[in-house]
Image (cartoon, rainbow, N blue to C red):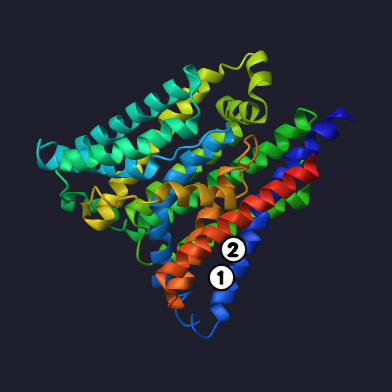
Amino acid sequence: MKLERNAQPGRRAQLGPWAMAGVLATMWAILAVLPATGDRFLTQGNLASLMAQSAVLLVVSVGMTLAILIRGIDLSVGAGVALTGVIAGLAHAKLGLPVPLAIGAALAAGALIGAWHGLWVGWLGVPAFIVTLAGFESYRGGALLLAHSRSVPMDDFQALDRPLPPGVTWALVIAVLAIGVALTLREATRRKQLGLAPITTSQVALRLGGQGLLAGIVLAIYGGRGMPVLVAVACAIALGGVFVTRRTRFGRHLYAIGGNPEAARLSGIDVKRVTLWVYVILGVLTAAAGVLAGARTDDVTPGSQGNLLELNAVTAVVIGGTSLSGGRGSVAGTVLGTLVFGTVANGMNLLGIDSDWQWVCTGMILLVAALVDVLSKGKRS
């Protein structure tokens, strides 16, 4: 009986991504039939553009999910994207470092920024909101100082925005699908062997069907033209986030800390160390997003690059079902939340809605998502 009670929250938690997938499918269906967008939205070119536009946000949102799971947040990621992008561009243009080493320098800078945040939040006990709000100001200023308030060219980083060969795209998608199928079947078998609440045949079929459908959509968009490297990187980071949160001890510690930090500490979890690593990972992903954003736009404008990206990332994470109070959510939900956010922006652009109204709609979406989180928390209580 105890096992059954413990299994219930897990089953409820799995409903979030599926519900969000239904919301995304509904949005796509509506945009596909609206007279103003029907002949443009479901085109291969538009969907490819939607994916590319969402890639940078997805990279940051995966890291933001980890932070929010432990009841943290990072309000500096937009400024961090500008700073690390400037570091990569200057390391290549001014210091003459090859592009791979310039990217490595940016990632190292992101790791140091994350470690700095983790030290203040985990060891000194300063609220993450305050620590990262200070970074929001400082890193933007640092980017402007390093670049002397000028744009930094990123022309030699354009390889990150070029498509992979179609054959490589097919091979990657099929390989990822095979791994997903194998892990799903292995999980079902191991739960039965360990005497845990089993995954029903219908649930296994639903998961396998969802994976197959996702692979089919990706191949329909990119199978003939090849997937851009930046989209492939974003997908790899998202898959890594799913694996870490669902299948590692570190991932279990994230949920335990978010659920009850003191109980997690008393159970033997090193809360300070986990917090440090969460912010280091988020810092590295912020730097990766900075390089990808610069490669996509061919330069880094330190005063505006990544502007309000932190708010968009929080919106995508909350839309995806991750609770702002910590301990509940998933990277899979964040992926879908990012696509929902991108679909809203893409749809409003196709409808010709003024950019000012787009900001209003984005704010309302975040408010509604937060309300849903509060109401669902009340029902659980």
Query: What kind of element bears circle 2?
Result: helix
Question: As shown in the figure, which amino acid type bears the numbered disc 2?
Answer: Leu
The relative height of residue 216 versus residue 351 in the rendered view (above or below) is above
Q: How far from the left and from the top, in percent, is residue 212?
A: 58, 57
The relative height of residue 217 versus residue 105 in the rendered view (above or below) is below
Circles 1 and 2, Cβ within 8 Å, touching? The answer is yes
Please name the residue shown 18% across and 43% down the image.
89
In the picture as drawn, the residue positioned furthest to the bottom comes out as 35
Q: Which residue is mark 2?
A: 24
Res. 343 visible in picture: no
Quadrant assignment for the C terminus:
top right
Question: As shown in the figure, which amino acid type bears the numbered disc 1?
Answer: Trp
In this rendering, position of residue 85 left or right of residue 126:
left
In the picture as drawn, the residue positioned furthest to the right comes out as 1
Q: Quadrant of residue 102?
A: top left
Res. 128 visible in picture: yes
Taking depth in this image into account, of 324 and 281 the one nearest to the observer is 324
In this rendering, position of residue 55 left or right of residue 206:
left
Q: Which residue is mark 1?
A: 28
Quadrant assignment for the N terminus:
top right
Q: CA distance from mark 1 to mark 2?
A: 6 Å
Please name the residue shown 43% across and 78% down the image.
352
The relative height of residue 352 versus residue 226 in the rendered view (above or below) is below
Q: Quadrant of residue 167?
A: bottom left
Please name the residue shown 39% across and 29% down the image.
114
The relative height of residue 53 versus residue 66 in the rendered view (above or below) is below
Q: Quadrant of residue 33?
A: bottom right
In this rendering, position of residue 315 left or right of residue 1:
left
